[in-house]
Amino acid sequence: MDPEARKVIEMGYGGAERLTMNMGPQHPSAHGVFRAILTLQGETVVGMDAVIGYLHRCHEKLGETLTYTQYPSIASKTDYVAAMSSELAYVRAAELLGKIEVPKRAQYLRVLVGELQRIASHCVWLGTWCMDMGGALGGGATVFLYCIREREMVLDLFEALVGARLLYGFHQVGGTRYDLPAGWVQTCRETVDFIDRRITEWEEMLEDNDFFLARARGVGVISRELAQEIGISGPLIRASGVNYDIRRAEPYSSYEDFDFKVPVETAGDCYARYRVRMVEFRESSKIVRQVLDGLPEGPISSRPGVKSVGQVRIPKGEAYARVEGPRGEVGCYLVADGSAKPYRMKWRGASFSNLAVLPHIIPGHKVADVVAIMGSVDPVFGEVDR
Amino acid sequence: MGEALSGFIAGFIVLNAVVGIVTYVTLLERKFAARMQSRIGPYRVGPHGLLQPIADALKLMMKEDIVPRLADRVVYNLAPVVFLIPCMLIFATIPFAPGLGVADLNIGILFFLAVSAMEIVGLFMAGWGSNNKYALLSAMRAVNQIISYDLPFIFTALVPVLLAGSLRLSDIATAQAGLWFVFYPVIGQLAFAAFIITTLAAENRVPFDILEAESELVAGFRVEYSGMKFALIQLGEYAHMVGTSFLGALLFLGAWAGPGPAWLGPVWFLLKAMGVFLLVTWVRWSFVRIRVDQILAISWKLLLPLSLLLLMATALVVVLRSGPGV
């Protein structure tokens, strides 16, 4: 925060001249439906009220009315930009409860789609963030279209694998529902190599651009203390200097088999978050290559194929499973009562917790920074409101 | 009487030609941007989308004209016209070929600069009259930005004036018969670069498009406009852009000079202006927008002193070149 802005807030002069401006729920940079009530002092934001809930679809109640076989394909609708990770959180919770083994091949396949999903999701993030800063009628739109073009290739891979492009239903309790089709591995390798080269291009386009740096550096600083207090996760907390990645801290689905780096930046600003995600792009493709190299043979599920929706019964108990989604910790808490449906279900959305940091960091910035910071947090409102 | 009539006819022709060029410049920009973004761009209306601008204009004419209930009706309704008139007037002094223009004033460039600075009045009226917070913020930004960038814009535009020794635009064009001012050692290139930057700001293009800033202010000062009023504002913006491109081509690129017979002059001029326009468009579609405080800092701390220095250096060069006592 620049000292001038700090003075505006602390002195509070001008009192009655403040302007209350409503950003959203329908706004070009709302990333969905998000309402920010901004209090402005000239161009400087002195207060922000975040209003969420416009996309509430009773997901947790829905989880109680659908069986363990049905819900995974609905779970993908919480975070529709990274559907694979929310599916995985749900089936992992069910597997923990039922103590269900997952075959090695299925675990590897889960890692594979999870990392591809991370690449696709970060593509959306980079594109929309640049569009927030650069405008739909400017360089931002150019970056956006480049990113969406590359995301399309990952979606093509998913389409060949699952048949769906956005909401997959790939995971099921005990394993995965689909195995790799013929020729998929080769296409996947080529795609990942291609996207790696493209990432270098994007970096050249953005990091050699002083205007981009001016917009990203020193803007929206989240201190290490604030980050831990709010409970943000994923690239945000790693950009604030906390080396925390669930894939490393609490490996699931055989993540301990793979060699990858967890990027950590200390600045905590938009640029640090950008750098963390750019490194994650490359680390994800590294993991994808390792999975493809070491993919074991064997069954893809420890349970028989789905014949009826009430087929999976989970014994009484409760469990919390978490996975590292592209936006951070995606958690699913399940209470089972022995039937084919959970008794209670609760989501821990990464975007929801990350969004809570906004009112703490936005005051003191200019209106233009609000959209840059919001874009760098990368919220998906399907996951915030559920 | 005869002179007034011929002036009227010339004005009528130029006005319509400008509207035609401006309409098709939108298509040019869209096609160019589409190529940059690995898209195709407008393609469906007519061969290669050639009828797209006409379809757009027809669509805007048929749109409902909405006036916000609490808007200041007089100001709101007048603003598009007040905005459009200066944007059209700037073409009055541009000579499209030797002797081919509406009015070749002996202070042509001053007229151009003065009139183009007047568009801010219409802009602010639109922002104020809409009774919309986004529009108001945008209008405030507009005043800030245009006032800060008009000074360096004028200083850089005065560099060719000094080199040519005349304020008349046709004189500046003929003075470049030997050497286009953009090729004038050091000074020419610096002035041209500064001219392009200030042009970007004066035309409210990315990276200086904080008035429109659709990701922050939705559409800025024209957020409440619809139908023909919106079309008039768009027309004004693009007319201003085309006018400034012509000015750039005239001040730095030798205007109508080019190979071939003399009647090809206007064609060369148009091509050069479109070259300047595409240069600006190129920057627009590859940069991100910068913040209002950064924009002001660039103008007052960097561009203004540098353009002033450049102007003084040019004056020095001109004096030295012509020798003492002249």
Image (tube, coloured by chain):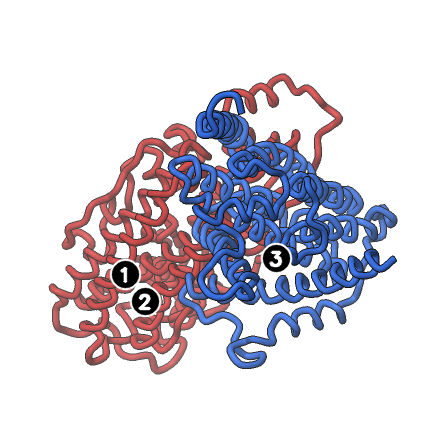
Chain colours: A red, B blue
Residues at discs 2 and 1 in contact (Cβ within 8 Å): yes
Q: Are marks 2 and 3 on the same chain?
A: no
- How far is the residue under mark 1 from the one under mark 3? 49 Å
**Residue at 53% of width from left, 53% of height from top?**
B255
Quadrant of residue A188 in the image? Answer: bottom left
Can see residue B17? Answer: yes
A225 is higher (above) or lower (below) than A213:
above
Nearer to me, A31 or B305: B305
Tell me the chain of label 2.
A
Q: Amino acid at mark 3?
A: Phe
Instruction: Tell me what residue is drawn at x 35 percent, y 53 percent.
Output: A325
In the depicted view, which residue is nearer to us: B183 or B215? B183
* Chain where mark 1 sits: A
Q: Please report the residue visible at 26 percent of the width from the left and 69 percent of the height from the top.
A: A175
Residue identified by numbered label 3:
B96
Q: Which mark is residue A275?
A: none
Looking at the rendered structure, the kind of residue marked 2 is Val
Q: Which residue is mark 1?
A: A195
Label 2, secondary structure: give it: helix
Q: Nearer the viewer, residue A215 or B181?
A: B181
Position of residue A242 relative to residue B32, above or below, is: above
Q: Pointer 2: what residue?
A: A154
Residue B62 image offset from top left, x and y in percent = 76, 71
